[in-house]
Amino acid sequence: MKKFFQSIGIITLMIGSFMLTGQVETTSKLSDQLLNEIKSKKDGYKENAIEPLIKDNTIIPGVNGREVDTQKSYEEMSKIGYFDDKFLVYKTLRVEETLDKNKDKYIISLNNSKMEISLLFKLDKNDDITSIVKKLSEKNIKGTFFIDSNYLEKHHNQVIELIKNGHTIGNLSNSENYQDSDFVWMKTIITNIGPQKYNYCYTEKENKEIIKNCKLQDSYTIIPTIVIKKSPLINIKKNLKPGFIISLEVDKNTDKEIETILNYIISKGYNIKALEDGLKE
């Protein structure tokens, strides 16, 4: 009888071993199929990097690309056992000529490969932007507000709130004099009170002193693609194109038309980005 049970035990172990081997082989086969499927499909998800466009003293930023990380994607999909592109893991393909390497160039546009534009609002110390900020916030849109030192002194609490809420603050120094000491302390405040990483200078035409001083302070210099000083809605309708950086005067016309301007831009399929977001590579 003892030998009988020993025989049964050996047979059971053999059957179990065969079953386990079959399961391992099945799992291995499925794993190989999944890995091969990821490899065969990954090129369809690749986005090539777009290098910046540099011409003379100007630059239009590039855009980083991405490609599938085969091994990490396989590790994620192994948990579910089948291919699902929601579980793809990517690695970044970075542009070679970054904005950080070209602070001696004027930024004249966002990259026009995307349906994005940026609205700049240029302020003086007496401008009231309450209505503009309210309309932007209602549509979850971030703007860029260029201010000088007088405005910062008078409205510092408002400026802090703008930065904390994801808007970008541009630096006009003291009446756009970038040799003035106000430029440096403004930069320190703007880039240290919230998530804004970069400092932005403003000029409407090339200026050697501005670009020199802004580069020394590790800042980007913006020349808007278009500058609108009157009839903002009409001029935006005439000139709107992907990548445009549009400078608007803060006056009664802009205040009155801002909601219609935002609705028009959105209706044309554009996303409105603050500089801090729009210039990300």
Image: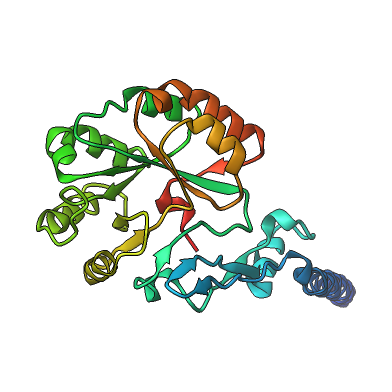
| 167 displayed left or right of 68 | left
Residue at 48%, 30% (x, y): give it: 231
Query: How is the model colour-coded?
Result: rainbow
Q: Position of residue 186 (x, y in %)?
A: 17, 51
174 left or right of 35 in image:
left
- Locate residue 250, reporting x and y percent: 34, 32
- Going 58% across and 43% down the picture, which residue do you hit? 239
Q: Position of residue 15 (x, y in %)?
A: 89, 72
166 relative to 180, above or below = above
Q: How many marks?
A: 0
Decide: is 178 above or below 189.
Answer: below
For the N terminus, the quadrant is: bottom right
Whole-percent x and y of residue 115? 62, 48
Q: Quadrant of residue 20?
A: bottom right
Q: In the image, is 3 to the left or to the right of 281?
A: right
- At x 35%, y 71%, the residue is 103
Q: Residue furthest left?
A: 181
Q: Nearer the viewer, residue 227 or 159?
A: 227
Residue ID at (44%, 25%): 135
Could you say which is closer to the camera, residue 197 or residue 209?
209
Q: Quadrant of residue 19?
A: bottom right
